[in-house]
Image: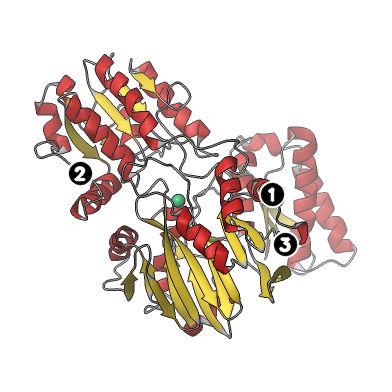
C-alpha cells in the first residue's frame, strides 16, 4: 500500500495483504497499518489497484470498512476479482471506475494515466500520476514477456513517451532485481506440459495459483490436445476461472469442463484436475489428496501431479511435505525444481535495466520486495546512470518528499503489521505472538500460592502445573521449598505488593527451570491472599 499526497489530498495505490509465516502462529492474514491515514480517510480521492493479486487487493475490504465510498480504480479483471472478494465481506456495489491502458482520468489533483504491463495475472496496469509537483510512474508488478498468451505486452512505447515528458519519480518492482538476465516466457512451459501429458496414461493433477489465468489456459490447451476433460478443484480456482472466462480472459473450448465430482465417472486417463494448494496450504485440496483425506480424489501409483507454481519463501516445508506425501502414494511429482513448469511474474535485472534506460527517470524508488531486492534494484538504477543521491530506499512507513524534481526521505510514520486472527483485527500484537511462540516452543508453568494477608506466611501451595514439558508435578518437588523461602524473605523485607510477590516467584522458578531443565517456558505466577 502506497499513499501519495498533494495539497492535503490523498491517492492510495494498492492495498494488499501479507500471508503469515511460521513466526506468526495462529495469524490468518497481515494487513497494512491504516493508522497514518485513519483520521484523513475523507481526503482519499481514490484507491488505484494495479492488478488482482492478493498482495495488492487483499486488504481492500478492511479499508472500505473504515470508509465505504472510497472510489476503486482498476482494470476490468482486477475489479471483478476484487468484487467477488468484497461480496464475501458483504460489501455490495462499491464506488468504482473501470479503466484500461491509455485511459487518462483525474481524481482531485491527481491526473492518472494507465499503461499496460505484463504480469502473472492478466490486465495488470502501471499508473502515471501527474500533479503540479511532478510526474510519478508506478509500474505495479510487471515483467517484459515479449510473446505473452494474450499479446498484451508491457507498453515500453508509453514508458518512453512518459520518459520524454519527464518522469520525476519511478517506482519499480524489485522482486527479481537480484536475478540476472530476462524472465523466461510463459509460453516456454507449453512444450514441457505437452511432454508430461504425452507421457501419462493415468490421472493428471495440476496445481497452480488460482489467479494465474494464462497458466490455467496452457493446462486447458494441453488437456484439449490430449483428449482430456478438465475439472477445477478448490473454491478460489472455481470462482476466479469462472470470472476470467465470463470476461473473455480465459478461453475454454466447449465440452472441456466437467464438474469435479463427475470426474470419477470418466476414465482417469481422460481427465485433468486443476487445483489450488500449490503452496502446501494445509486445508487445500492438494494437501488433503496427499494425506489421503480428500473426499473423492485418491492417488494411485502412476498418477502424475504437476506443481506449476513458484515456491514462496516460508512455504518450503509445507510444499515438500505435500510432494513427499504424493510421492509416497506412488505419484510422479513434476515441479519447478525438476522441470520448467513455472516462470516468474516479475522482471529480472535485464528487464529493469531496459526500463531505466527507456524512462530515464530523475529519481528512482524501488518498491515491492524485501530490503535485499530493493537494494539490488537501486544498484541497477545507479548502473543505468541515475545519480546516487536520486535513488531512495524506502521501507514501510518511510516518507519521501518530491520537491522541485528531487526525491528525498524526509521522515517516517509509525506503521507495523496488523494481524487478522479469526474475527479480531489488530487485537493480536507482536507481544501476543511472542507469547504464542514461547508457548509453542517452551511450554507453560503456572504457580499458585496462597499467603496469609496479615502475616504474609505461605498457607497453601505452591501448586505447580506445567504444560508442554515436565507434566509430572513431582518434577517440581525440589523447588517448592525454594519458592516458600523466597516469598518468606521478601515479606520479611517488607514486600507486600501482590505483583512484586509474583515477580519473586517468576524469578525463582525461571532460574530453576532454566538451570535444571534447560528451558525458558512462560511462567504465570498467581499469589492469592487469604
Ligand atoms: Zn502481482
Q: CA distance from mark 3 to mark 1?
A: 14 Å
Image quadrant of residue 67?
A: bottom left
Q: Earlier in the sequence, mark 2 or mark 1?
A: 2
**Badge 2 is on which residue?**
251
Residue bearing mark 3: 390
Q: Nearer the viewer, mark 3 or mark 1?
A: 3
Asked if residue 497 can be seen in this view, the reply is yes
CA gap, disc 2 and disc 1: 40 Å
Regarding mark 3 in the picture, which secondary structure is present there?
helix
Label 1 sits on residue: 375
Tally of numbered discs: 3
Relative to 447, is 63 above or below? below
Q: Is residue 35 left or right of residue 77?
A: right
Classed neighbour count for the residue bearing mark 2: other residues with Cα under 10 Å, few (<14), some (14–19), many (≥20): some
Looking at marks 3 and 1 on the same chain, the residue that comes earlier in the sequence is marked by 1
Relative side of 416 to 32, left or right: right
Residue 234 coordinates in the image, percent (x, y): 27, 42
Most extreme residue toward the right is 493
Q: Are the residues at dot 3 and dot 2 in contact (C-beta closer than 8 Å)? A: no
Residue 32, can we see it? Answer: no
The quadrant holding residue 203 is: top left
Q: At numbered mark 1, what does the secondary structure look like: helix, strand or loop?
A: helix
Amino acid at each position: 500500500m502506497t499513499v501519495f499526497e498533494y495539497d492535503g489530498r490523498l491517492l492510495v495505490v494498492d492495498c494488499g495483504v501479507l500471508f503469515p509465516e511460521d513466526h506468526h502462529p495462529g495469524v490468518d492474514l497481515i494487513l497494512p497499518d491504516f493508522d497514518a491515514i485513519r483520521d484523513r480517510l475523507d481526503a482519499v480521492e481514490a484507491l488505484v489497484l494495479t492488478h488482482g493479486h492478493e498482495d495488492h487487493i487483499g486488504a481492500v475490504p478492511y479499508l472500505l470498512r473504515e470508509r465505504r465510498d472510497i472510489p476503486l480504480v482498476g482494470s476490468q479483471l482486477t475489479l471483478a476479482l476484487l468484487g467477488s472478494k468484497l461480496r464475501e465481506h458483504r460489501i455490495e456495489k462499491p464506488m468504482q471506475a473501470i479503466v484500461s491502458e491509455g485511459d487518462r482520468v483525474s481524481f482531485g489533483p491527481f491526473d492518472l494515466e494507465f499503461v499496460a504491463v505484463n504480469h502473472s495475472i492478466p490486465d495488470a496496469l502501471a499508473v502515471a500520476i501527474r500533479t503540479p509537483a511532478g510526474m510519478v510512474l508506478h509500474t505495479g508488478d510487471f515483467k517484459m514477456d515479449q510473446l505473452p498468451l494474450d499479446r498484451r505486452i508491457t507498453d515500453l512505447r508509453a514508458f518512453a513517451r512518459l520518459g520524454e515528458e519527464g518522469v520525476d519519480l519511478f517506482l519499480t518492482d524489485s522482486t527479481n532485481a537480484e536475478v540476472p538476465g530476462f524472465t523466461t516466457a510463459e509460453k516456454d512451459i507449453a512444450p514441457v506440459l505437452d511432454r508430461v501429458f504425452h507421457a501419462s496414461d493415468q490421472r493428471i493433477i495440476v496445481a497452480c495459483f488460482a489467479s494465474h489465468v494464462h497458466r490455467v489456459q496452457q493446462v486447458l490447451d494441453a488437456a484439449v490436445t490430449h483428449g482430456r476433460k478438465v475439472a477445477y478443484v478448490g473454491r478460489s480456482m472455481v470462482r476466479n476461472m469462472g470470472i476470467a472466462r465470463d470476461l473473455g480472459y480465459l478461453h475454454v473450448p466447449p465440452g472441456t469442463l466437467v464438474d469435479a465430482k463427475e470426474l470419477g465417472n470418466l476414465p482417469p486417463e481422460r481427465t485433468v484436475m486443476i487445483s489450488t494448494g500449490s503452496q502446501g496450504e494445509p486445508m487445500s485440496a492438494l494437501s488433503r489428496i496427499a494425506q489421503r483425506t480428500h473426499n473423492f480424489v485418491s492417488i494411485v501409483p502412476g498418477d502424475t501431479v504437476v506443481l506449476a507454481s513458484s515456491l514462496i519463501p516460508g512455504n518450503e516445508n509445507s510444499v515438500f511435505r505435500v510432494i513427499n506425501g504424493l510421492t509416497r502414494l506412488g505419484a510422479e511429482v513434476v515441479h519447478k525444481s525438476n522441470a520448467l513448469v513455472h516462470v516468474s511474474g516479475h522482471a529480472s535485472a535485464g528487464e529493469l535495466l531496459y526500463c531505466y534506460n527507456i524512462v530515464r527517470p530523475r529519481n528512482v524508488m524501488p518498491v515491492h520486495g524485501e530490503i535485499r531486492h530493493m537494494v539490488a534494484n537501486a544498484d541497477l538504477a545507479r548502473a543505468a546512470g541515475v545519480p546516487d543521491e536520486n535513488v531512495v530506499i524506502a521501507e514501510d512507513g518511510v516518507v519521501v518528499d518530491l520537491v522541485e524534481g528531487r526525491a528525498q526521505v524526509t521522515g517516517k510514520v509509525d506503521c507495523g503489521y496488523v494481524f487478522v486472527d479469526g474475527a479480531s483485527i489488530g487485537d493480536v500484537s507482536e507481544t501476543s505472538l511472542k507469547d504464542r511462540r514461547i508457548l509453542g516452543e517452551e511450554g507453560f508453568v503456572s504457580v499458585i500460592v496462597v499467603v496469609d494477608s496479615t502475616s504474609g506466611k505461605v498457607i497453601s501451595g505452591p501448586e505447580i502445573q506445567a504444560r508442554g514439558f515436565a507434566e509430572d508435578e513431582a518434577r517440581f518437588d525440589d523447588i517448592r521449598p525454594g519458592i516458600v523461602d523466597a516469598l518468606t524473605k521478601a515479606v520479611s523485607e517488607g514486600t507486600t505488593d501482590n505483583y512484586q510477590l509474583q515477580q519473586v516467584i517468576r524469578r525463582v522458578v525461571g532460574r530453576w527451570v532454566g538451570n535444571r531443565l534447560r528451558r525458558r517456558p512462560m511462567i504465570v505466577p498467581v499469589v492469592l491472599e487469604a
